Image: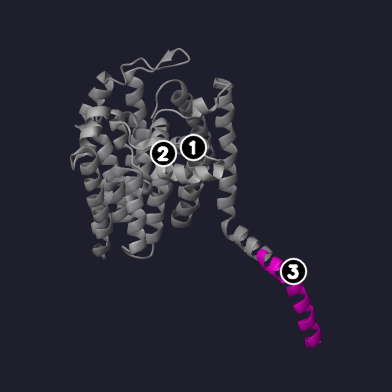
Amino acid sequence: MITKFLNYLSILKKLGLVQQLSIKDRLKKFYKRDKDLLKLLVVYTLFKPIFIIIAYLINPENIYSVIVKWDSLHFLRIATVGYANSEDYAFSYLYPFLIKVFSYLFYGNYVFSSIFISNLFGYLTIIVFYKTYGYKATFLLAFFPTFLLYSFVPYSDTVTLFFIALTLYLLKGRENNIKAMISYSLSILSSYTTAITLPAFFLKKYRRFIVIPLILGEILFMFFKASTGDFLGLFYIEHEYWGTDFTTPWGQIKWLLNGSFTSQNWSVFGYVLKPIYWITRNLAFEAFFLASLYPLFRRDKFEFSFSLLIIIQLLLIIGVPAISIPRLILKSLPSFYGISIMLDKKFYVPYATLGLILSVLFFIQQSVAFFA
């Protein structure tokens, strides 16, 4: 009997059936373990065609012109011709580099490449974040309005968020290891302002690996010296071309009331977006993330400090970044875990519904007015 079984097993192996059964078993095990993640990804994916439909309704002759706006144009120009314009130096090179690399898969189509990367890294961010913080926190991230929007349009945010999420994952259950700091360095290379969170890593035990982002910082300073003639060229460009400066929270409100961007009478289908709109919108997003700090403080001082540094930076800034707060504040990724501790699961369906509605409104605003 044993001989017959071994002969039968040998035949199955030759036919490749044993391997197929093994893969099937693995898929079943994966589904059983991560079915919540798979369901979340399916629903998240179903939201994306809504943006395509809206883009078509706005401009059926050229939906790319609706999707590719504002910062996307700078990233595509850098990918195509490099830093030909001085104001482009405010945008880091990692995303344009990825656009160029992935464009080879799409026969040199940089626009399609940029959209593909933003969406791909959106999925990767969700998967890694789920592995770190579980279903509830990931649900809040996946259906947050600015994440929904900026994981679809070609912006660099999902690349930054992925490397932040990967850093947090690599630090989970371990300490300040070399892989985590390489990932963190890549998040800085994707968005320079992520470096504001560096002091939080001093709360970790093995601080010697912090030298990796510090070396990256030295390289970036030398890059700006060679390109602009000034080690601090980035700060000059941010101030000169994008109006970036630091103030108080009240100073930010006054800037939003009288700033050059908010006073340009941006309108959506005839409805003018007055300065009070920008203030109210910012305060709503800031309140959401500030609410997360208390549970984070009780759970993990590193995650609390990381999130706090992102939030404080945005509370004290003026210029274009002050208009971009609902997008830039996403880098406070641990905040979604903090909110998940406080928010009951019965609110999740209304939360996702509101997220979809707001993301649609923001997409329309992004396309026909100004959002950033």
Tag 3: amino acid: Leu
For the residue pair 94 and 361, the one nearer the viewer reads as: 94
Please give the range of residues in magenta: 1-23
User: Callout 1: 10 Å neighbours few (<14), some, many (20+)?
Assistant: many
Query: Residue at the spot x=36%, y=65% of the render?
Result: 174
Q: Residues within 10 Å of mark 3 (few under 14, many from 20)?
A: few
Residue at 49% x, 37% y: name it.
Answer: 110
Of the image marks 2 and 1, the number of the one nearer the N terminus: 2
Residue 250, position in %: x, y? Answer: 21, 28
The secondary structure that dominates the magenta segment is: helix
Q: Is residue 339 visible?
A: no
Q: Residue 18 magenta-drawn?
A: yes
Question: In this view of the protein, can residue 234 be seen by the observer?
Answer: yes
Residue 245 location in percent, x, y?
Answer: 21, 32
Residue 344 is situated, as x and y percent measured from the top left of the image, at 47, 45
Label 2 sits on a secondary structure element that is: helix
> Which of the two discs, 3 and 2, sits closer to the camera?
2
Q: Earlier in the sequence, mark 3 or mark 2?
A: 3
Residue at label 3? 17
Label 1 SS: helix
Question: To which residue does mark 1 refer?
Answer: 110
Three-letter residue code for mark 2: Ala
What is the C-alpha distance between the residues marked 3 and 2? 47 Å
Q: Quadrant where the N terminus lies? A: bottom right
Q: Quadrant of residue 91?
A: top left
Foreground residue among 158 and 270:
158
185 lies above or below 269: below
> Which disc number belongs to residue 79?
2
The reply to whether callout 3 and callout 2 are in contact (CB within 8 Å) is no
Q: Quadrant of residue 285?
A: top left
In this rendering, would 43 be left or right of 16? Answer: left
